[in-house]
Image (cartoon, grey):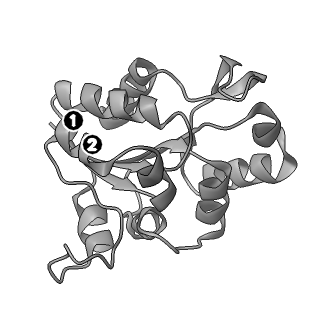
Amino acid sequence: MSVLVLGVSGSVSVYKACDLASKLVQAGHTVRTVMTHHAAELVSPQLFEALTGEAPFVDEFSEERQGGMDHIELAQAAELFLVAPMTGNLAARLALGIADDLVSTVSLAIAKGTPRLACPAMNPSMLDHPAVQRNLKALVEDGWEVMEPGSGNMACGDEGAGRLPEPAEILARVEELLSR
């Protein structure tokens, strides 16, 4: 069906991103995963490779590269750019146009008009922080769609909004965006 680029950042909800990647593939999409270094510390990139059949990208300067410009090639292939989970840190960097890792450089290279979907996931206090809210608003103004986080118990023991939406909900939104 479609080629999706899945950006994954270092939130404890990364386990849901694994399920999401699997569901996207089961729905017939090609999923090319791009991970921040923090995400790769929480879950092995090999898991995403097993789930998607595509080797994930973590470092644009790794020894595995074959001379191409991964961020450009990934951005040009993307029919939709999905970031799930999106941490407060990544939201700030993307809102400011800071390209200091592969996820953020791919984000800057995504063609205008390509759907971009952000799925924030963080502690409720972090999500509610004015800087995070300002950055999410800036992303929307830049053309991103931002899904509302779910509410409930968090890994840290707090309760409130900040949970990564369920993979089935994200998949449904991806399908809606692709059908436009």
State the residue lying farthest toward the right. Answer: 130
Q: Position of residue 128 (x, y in %)?
A: 82, 38
The residue singled out by tag 2 in the image is 48
Q: Are marks 2 and 1 in contact (CB under 8 Å)?
A: yes
Q: Estimate how packed mark 2 is, as few (under 14), some (14 to 19) or many (20 or more) residues with alpha carbons within 10 Å.
A: many
Q: Is residue 137 above or below residue 15?
A: below
Q: Can you tell which mark lies on residue 51? A: 1
Q: Can you tell which mark lies on residue 74? A: none
Tell me which residue sits at (84%, 45%) in the image: 129
State the residue lying farthest toward the top. Answer: 152
* Number of numbered discs visible in the structure rendering: 2
Q: Position of residue 168 (x, y in %)?
A: 39, 18
Tell me which residue sits at (41%, 68%) in the image: 102
Question: Which type of secondary structure does the marked residue at label 1 adopt?
Answer: helix
Q: Is residue 12 above or below residue 92?
A: above
> How far apart in space, not on screen, are marks 2 and 1 (Cα)?
5 Å
Is 9 placed left or right of 93 in the picture? left
Q: Position of residue 38 (x, y in %)?
A: 51, 55
Nearer-the-camera pick, 128 or 80: 128
